[in-house]
Amino acid sequence: MKFSEMNIEKSVLDSLVEIGYENPTEIQKETIPLIKEGHDVIGQSETGSGKTAAFGIPLVERIEKNGKIQALVLAPTRELSEQISRELMKFSKFKKLNISCIYGGVSIEPQISNLRHSEIVVGTPGRILDHIQRRTLDLRNIKIFVLDETDKMLDMGFIDDIEDIVRNVPKERQTLLFSATMPENIFRLRDRFTRNVKRIKTQTKVREDLLEQFYFDIDQNKKFSLLVHVIKKEEPNLSIIFCNTRVEAENVSKNLRRNKINAEVLHGGISQYRRNQIIEEFHKGKIEILVATDVAARGLDIKNVSHVFNYSIPKNSEDYINRVGRTARAGKSGKAISFLAKIDHQAFQEILNKYRPKVEKLETPRFPDLPFMKREEYRRFNRGFHPRRNHRFRSY
């Protein structure tokens, strides 16, 4: 099947042709006809399978250019909100729809101005609720309400905000929930927010014939040294190193740069302007390694990632699946390598029990023991305190 065979409005189809969309993915083939028919839909498919186009194409097709907000899309992060907005702009190029991207951490005044003449709003729950409370966002004409990355929004504690937002959306609407994983709390959400919903589930894991998964069992204080050794041996094209906390991500990225490895950190504590810069530089290959937390990297469409490194194992099993789904995309092969210390064993065992991925244990090679400077030591170093060689440095 081709998009040209799916009875898509000509202006939208022309946009798809211009951006090179010809053949729909599985999730798009399954959900677009149902959405066009007006059904509420839950769509579940693997990371990178084209979920934004799956709801975005029929959404844009249904919206009229009249200056009234008719569609609201909620996403868990600023980056994902911006990514969805860019995609919707591409799909609606010839309809000339106005799309507002709404999130916190930036001035609210330009957003208020843009909302006055928008047809589609994409944003994070907190800032959307802020505009509702300020009465700068009118949701009375909403036809389509979308929750993207629903599982992550629930994990991040947005359920109360989402419920408050839904109270301001007309009951006569179409509701679409999209997610890579489908934990039990999503079904409770389904029962409250949707009517006669159609559930579509396509492949939810990357293909194991394309994704090789490995792990090392290593002492915590040897992790960084082994990581550097593996990076130099593997010579990845583009890679993402996942850490569980902002502090850990900061420490790892700074120490990688001390070892002349081209890496940059990405987490929620970085300014939006800088985050956008980092993502753009990573897309272009100017940054070869991204050291990220799960929230910052969630939903980002980054192509050609050859390696994913789990510096620490996430407590949430679904986050592991989303992490490794950053590689082995679009028919290309990829590697996921995890570094397990004693503290990671329980979380990793839960992943193995739940998803049964094919993961091979690697023998720990010989590698040089590298110094690792933690954040407080960097502060002392930058204030002029230069410890003796290896003094107060820790391997970590």
Image (cartoon, helix red, strand yellow):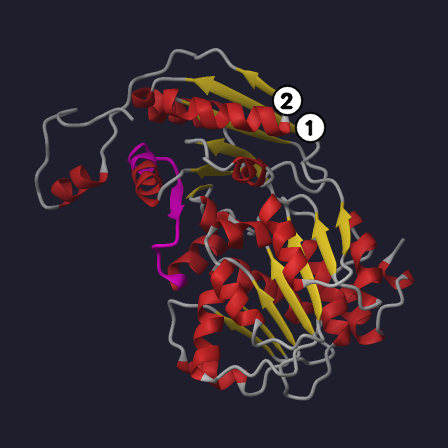
Q: Is residue 180 visible?
A: yes
Image-based side of 14 in relation to 128, left or right: right
**Foreground residue among 160 and 335:** 160
Q: Can residue 284 be seen in this view?
A: no
Q: Is residue 3 above or below residue 349?
A: below
| Point 61% across, 75% down: residue | 169
Question: Residue 23: percent from the left, percent from the top?
Answer: 82, 53
**Foreground residue among 386 and 81:** 81
**Foreground residue among 393 and 144:** 144
Question: Residue 95: percent from the left, percent from the top?
Answer: 73, 79
Image-based side of 277 in relation to 167, left or right: left
Q: How busy is the neighbourhood of tag 1: few (under 14 within 10 Å), some, or many (20 plus)?
A: some
| Point 71% across, 27% down: residue | 209
The residue under label 1 is 208
Q: Does the magenta stretch include residue 207?
A: no
Give the amino acid type for the residue marked by disc 2 in the picture: Lys
> What element does badge 2 sit on?
loop
Label 2 vs 1, first from the N-terminus: 1
* Stretch in magenta: 255-272
Quadrant location of the C terminus in the rendered image: top left
Image-based side of 257 in relation to 35, left or right: left
Q: Does the magenta stretch include residue 256?
A: yes
Give the amino acid type for the residue marked by disc 1 in the picture: Glu
| Point 43% across, 44% down: residue | 292
Distance, label 2 to label 1, CA atoms, is 7 Å
Q: Could you tell me if the residues under marks 2 and 1 are in contact, i.e. CB atoms within 8 Å? A: yes
Question: Residue 34: percent from the left, percent from the top?
Answer: 82, 61
Residue 358: which disc?
Answer: 2
**Foreground residue among 391 and 57:** 57
| Point 62% across, 80% down: residue | 98
